[in-house]
Amino acid sequence: MFEFPLFHGLDCNLGGTIGSSFDQLKDTDKLVRSFFEYMEAQDDFFKRVTCDSRFDYIRERMQNRVTKQAAESRPLKGIEQSVRNILLTFNNCIVLLYRQWVYDGRKIPMEEMIELATTLLENGMRRFRNK
């Protein structure tokens, strides 16, 4: 696979901005809002990397780095590693929700989309909150 130096720093702010400052099981609303606001503030190139399937290999590397940072965070300690991996992978659904929202032309107002995504992710995480 080719290495593109241009892409090496793309995920630096994403992980620090979104992944590390929230409890991933309790702060879903803050995570979703931060992700959507962060993505909407990015330039067209960054959005293309996120939404264009031709850049899946780049986006997946970015997601893997952010997921790794999240896996090392305090909120998920004490949960078995294999379960933690599934929970973190599930949290990556936010990227799919964002992509679909963009593909659909952002017809749902962003505030409603944040609320919808939050509801979907919170209900999926509810069982694990008190572990």
Image (tube, rainbow, N blue to C red):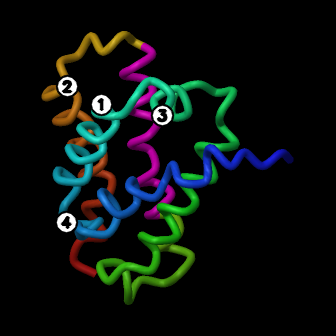
Give me the disc on residue 40. Answer: 1
**What's the amino acid at mark 3?**
Phe
Q: Is residue 78 above or below residue 66?
A: below
- Whether 91 is among the magenta residues is yes
Q: Position of residue 65 (x, y in %)?
A: 55, 63
Q: Are marks 2 and 1 in contact (CB under 8 Å)?
A: yes
Q: Residue drawn at (28%, 37%), measured in percent from left and top? A: 36
Q: Position of residue 5 (x, y in %)?
A: 68, 49
Q: How much space separates mark 4 and mark 1, taking CA atoms?
A: 24 Å
Q: Secondary structure at mark 2?
A: helix
**What's the amino acid at mark 4?**
Lys
Q: How much space separates mark 3 and mark 4, taking CA atoms?
A: 28 Å
In the rendered image, which quarter is residue 100 located in? top left
Q: Residue drawn at (51%, 34%), measured in percent from left and top? A: 50
* Between 6 and 109, the one nearer to me in the picture: 6
- Whether 94 is among the magenta residues is yes
The local crowd at label 3, few if under 14, some if 14 to 19, many if 20 or more residues have their Cα within 10 Å, is some
**What's the amino acid at mark 2?**
Met
Part of the protein shown in magenta: 87-103
Earlier sequence position, callout 4 versus callout 2: 4
Earlier sequence position, callout 3 versus callout 4: 4
Pointer 2 residue: 110
Q: In front: mark 2 or mark 1?
A: 1
Q: In front: mark 4 or mark 2?
A: 2
Q: In front: mark 2 or mark 3?
A: 3
Q: Are marks 4 and 1 in contact (CB under 8 Å)?
A: no
Q: Secondary structure at mark 1?
A: helix
Q: In front: mark 3 or mark 4?
A: 3
Pointer 3 residue: 46
Q: Position of residue 49 (x, y in %)?
A: 56, 33
